[in-house]
Image (cartoon, rainbow, N blue to C red):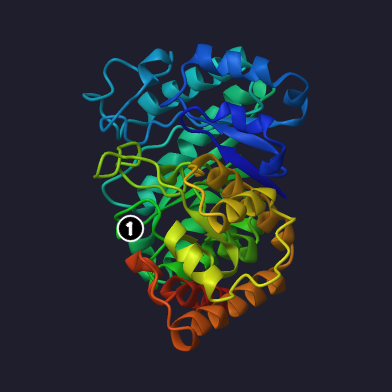
Amino acid sequence: MAAYLQLGHNSWNLFEEPDIGRYAGMVLSPVNDSPADVAAGLTRLGDLRPNLDVILDPQLYNPAVDKGLMDRWSYFPSDFATANHADAAWWIRRGIEVVEEGAKLGVNAICSPALLPRRFEDAYYSLMVEIADATWQEASIHGLQTLLTAIVSLSDLANPSRAYAIASVLSRSRCDRIYLTFLNEDVKQQREPLADPAGLPTAVHLVKLLSAQMRVHVAFASHDLVMWKYAGATDISSGKYMNLRRFSPGRWQEEKGGGQQAAYWTEGSLLTLLRSADVERLRRDGWFGDKDLSDNPASGRIMELIQTGSTKLWVKESWLQYLRWISNAEASWHGRPDAAEQFLEQSHRLWGDIVNVRRILFQDWFNEHGTHVKNWLNAVREGSAR
């Protein structure tokens, strides 16, 4: 059972913050950090390093969009844009080079290289297994673990039979760990809750099937981790930035509007993010009452700023609050599917209170009715019944 920090720009200092909670490790981001940056970051961790599981994700999904610092890594080839990405031998060579780079840095585990396909067919997953098994063989020589990387499109999961088909292919791998990423093309902004009511039940079913045979790590998670823990996922990872809580083809691009970071309150009971004005509205309406915020210290500090009308920016505090919630939630639901489902049921009731009793309308459109919670609750019920 573990929560991992999905690194992004300037994320290393978060491990020096005791208020983020318990994180078992990190997933490196070659887009944001060069090998020299990673080496310096690992050294900076000092006594914390032996207790952390460091995973290298080569991030070869979509570097044509913004490769960032990836060309500083030895495994990133000069012919990436022109190479035949259907060639297994080309990808296997990348896997060997990723292992060599990881071994030099002293990481604990490697994510097998993976591409973002045009079509999510069985042949794609077979190719991912072939690449992962070759990576596993090389990594074993260096004493490193390998996570089979697989990207799954939610739109492909509208067909319930896809869970069995995909799990059948992926479970053939020699890897006993899998790094699973769900792609949701319908999500336009990174802070939106995971959507696709047709595909989510099959996603829950897929995680359930894979968890019976492998250690499942769901990457780029957010509040939706409640579904993955319900389904049996061992690990999840998330990051402080919005674009590290959602995987999309252009996930390294800034959002329109300049990409400025806004402060969002993590309202765990509603499984969402709220703007400052929304939090103030809830506070005036008595929503928080005498709630004990001690299990998330950043919450108390943010609330004090809001109550006093302070103009001090609390973006960093919002990151700490969010990451602490992720850590707390992951631990509370691990191995307890009933608790995860009950939390969803309670959240659904609370959204009913917001909409029908308090008649509050939040600023972001995706927070209008709490539809995402209803979809997630339906997903765990339908997905587990298959």
x 55%, y 68%: residue: 283
Q: Which residue is rendered at x = 69% and y = 49% of the image?
A: 297
Q: Quadrant of residue 196?
A: bottom left
Pick the residue in front: 382 or 386: 382
Where is the C terminus found, in terms of image quarters?
A: bottom right
Asked if one can make out residue 176 in the rendered structure from this viewpoint, the answer is no
- Amino acid type assigned to the residue bearing label 1 in the image: Val
Where is residue 305? Give x, y as percent. Answer: 56, 51
In the picture, measured across the screen, residue 241 lies left or right of residue 25, that is: left
**Residue 340 on image: x %, y %:** 66, 69
Q: Nearer the viewer, residue 81 or 19?
A: 19
Is 313 situated above or below 84?
below
Answer above or below: position of 211 versus 64.
below
Q: Which residue is depicted at the point 36% across and 70% down?
A: 158
Along the line of sight, which residue is nearer the eye, 331 or 324? 324
Residue 256: % across, % down: 24, 45
Residue located 70% across and 74% down the image = 338
Task: For residue 56, say whether it is visible.
Answer: yes
Q: Nearer the viewer, residue 372 or 96?
A: 372
82, above or below 270, in the image: above
Q: Which residue is mark 1?
A: 187
